[in-house]
Amino acid sequence: MAEQRQDQRDPRDPRGDRNDARRANEAEAEAWEALVATARRTVTDGLVVGTSGNVSVRVDDTVLVTPSGVPYDRLRPDDITGVDLDGRQVLGTLVPTSELPMHLAVYRATDAGAVVHTHAVHATAVSTLVQELPTIHYMTAALGGPVRVAPYATYGTKELAENMLRALADRSGCLLQNHGTVTYGTTLDQAYDRTAQLEWMSHLWLTASAIPDRTPTLLTTPQLTEATQKMHTYGQHRP
């Protein structure tokens, strides 16, 4: 359930006193602005509905994260919500997302700079059908290889975070069974782009699989390896 916005703090709330002790620095304020823009984009692009899904970004040892149950279009600069890598709240008064254990698990295990979690419809549909997204397109290589499906566990639990980490081994994205997607990157843009690619590939496979009496052609391991190698030289490279 969505919590009620707390515009005024209870002076008896020790958490409020603690959070008053530290204000967001310039880097954190800028990162929060980018996080909110990314979170709103997940709604605009149809990757989440309502307050489902969540986004986080790391600034040094602080993880900024969307708060629980607050519509993204209502988030303001002073709603900044941040925790340390142990999950202790160090910025803001709004309760962090219920999926905080999952986000923190990614940061502890990888060099992630940002994490995006959505309930994208096509990717979630695929998570109910297979244990691994079939290699329908060479963009599979952009996520490190065939995208695995993490076994189902209740949202917000340590079990879900552990299942997710196993599915993410040597990957930058995975599906969560009957739940959604998780991707990470060095930046918010990269994490978001990986989410969008994962949803697109899921849509592509579902569409191709729906043709009667036809089986989609899948890429082989050597083909994916070649695509992976080419991606190292893709795009603009400044001297």
Image (cartoon, helix red, strand yellow):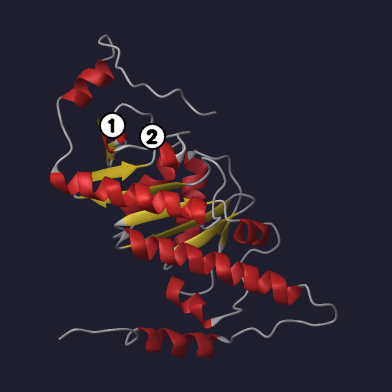
Residue shown at 33%/49% (left/top)?
35
Q: Do the residues labelled 1 and 2 touch (CB within 8 Å)?
A: yes
Residue 189 lies, with reference to residue 117, above or below; the image says below
At which x and y percent is residue 82?
A: 28, 38
Question: Where is mark 2, residue-wise?
Answer: 96
Quadrant hosting residue 4: top left
Q: In this view, does 193 lie to the left or right of 125?
A: left
* Disc marking residue 89: 1
In the image, what residue type sits under mark 1? Gln
Identity of the residue furthest to the right in this view: 213
Where is residue 85? Give x, y as percent.
Answer: 27, 42
Task: Find the residue positioned furthest to the top.
Answer: 12
Q: Does any portion of residue 61 appear in the rendered image?
A: no
Residue 79 visible in rendering:
yes
Horizontally, residue 185 falls left or right of residue 42, namely left
Q: How many marks?
A: 2
> Residue 168 versus residue 47: which sits nearer the camera?
47
Name which residue type carries label 2: Pro
Mark positioned earlier in the residue sequence (1 or 2): 1
Q: In this view, does 138 lie above or below 107?
A: below
Give the distance between the C-alpha atoms of the residues marked 1 and 2, in whole angstroms: 8 Å
